[in-house]
């Protein structure tokens, strides 16, 4: 049985993310560039993937969802650094993040707060498509992702300003 893993050539698990990953907006001034990601060892029967980025440390009472990519073809096992909407539309669908935008929204923790954890999770799904439009609220989308998850692999980056 293979081990399902998620890695990045840009950072190791529990290492700091870079300023280029920081959100460009709110009060952030980064480049909002998503890191390169790759996964391997998905379980047999994986029919698609979903990718989420979550900050459990955001001072909201429920964390902050920075990215939801779903209906990713099972042949895809990597995402290039800085992949934009056009690149990602070719491999899957994206939902609104908690910034209210579609796609990757980089880290932007409050200035002076301790480092926040940014948890990238790839989900191996038992269905080829969730059958939901990108306009579906992200909580509903995440519910459907979790309902169809065979296995997950995570990679956590840290960031503070």
Image (tube, rainbow, N blue to C red):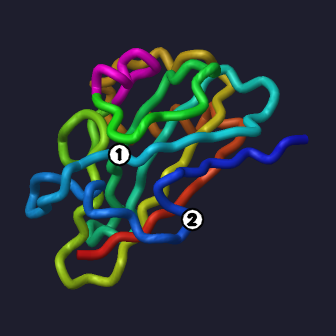
Given the current orientation, which residue lies at the most extreme right position? 1
Q: Name the residue under label 1.
A: 34
Q: Is mark 1 on a helix, strand or loop?
A: loop
Q: Residue 149 sits in which quadrant?
A: top right
Q: What residue lies at 30% left-to-right and 55% top-to-bottom?
A: 21
The spot of residue 84 in percent (x, y) is 29, 30
Is 137 one of the magenta-colored residues? no
Give the magenta part as a residue range.
85-94
Disc 2 to disc 1, C-alpha distance = 16 Å
Left or right: 99, with 64 as reference point: left
- Label 1 Cα crowd, 10 Å radius (few <14 / some 14-19 / many 20+): many
In the drawing, does residue 86 fall left or right of residue 101? right
Q: Position of residue 41 (x, y in %)?
A: 76, 39
Where is mark 2, residue-wise?
A: 13
Give percent across and percent down for residue 60: 26, 66
Whether 86 is among the magenta residues is yes
């Amino acid at each position: 049985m293979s081990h399902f893993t998620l890695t990045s050539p840009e950072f190791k698990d529990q290492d700091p993310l870079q300023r280029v990953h920081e959100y460009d907006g709110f009060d952030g001034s980064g480049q909002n560039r998503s890191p390169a990601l790759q996964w391997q060892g998905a379980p047999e029967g994986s029919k698609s993937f979903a990718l989420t980025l979550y900050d459990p440390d955001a001072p909201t009472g429920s964390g902050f969802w920075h990215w939801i990519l779903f209906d990713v073809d099972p042949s895809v096992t990597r995402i290039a650094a800085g992949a934009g909407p056009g690149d990602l539309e070719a491999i899957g669908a994206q939902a609104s993040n908690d910034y209210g935008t579609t796609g990757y929204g980089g880290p932007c923790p409050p200035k002076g707060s301790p480092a926040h954890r940014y948890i990238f999770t790839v989900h191996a799904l038992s269905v080829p498509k969730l059958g939901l439009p990108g306009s579906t609220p992200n909580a509903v989308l995440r519910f459907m992702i979790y309902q169809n998850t065979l296995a997950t692999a995570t990679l956590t980056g840290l960031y503070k300003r």
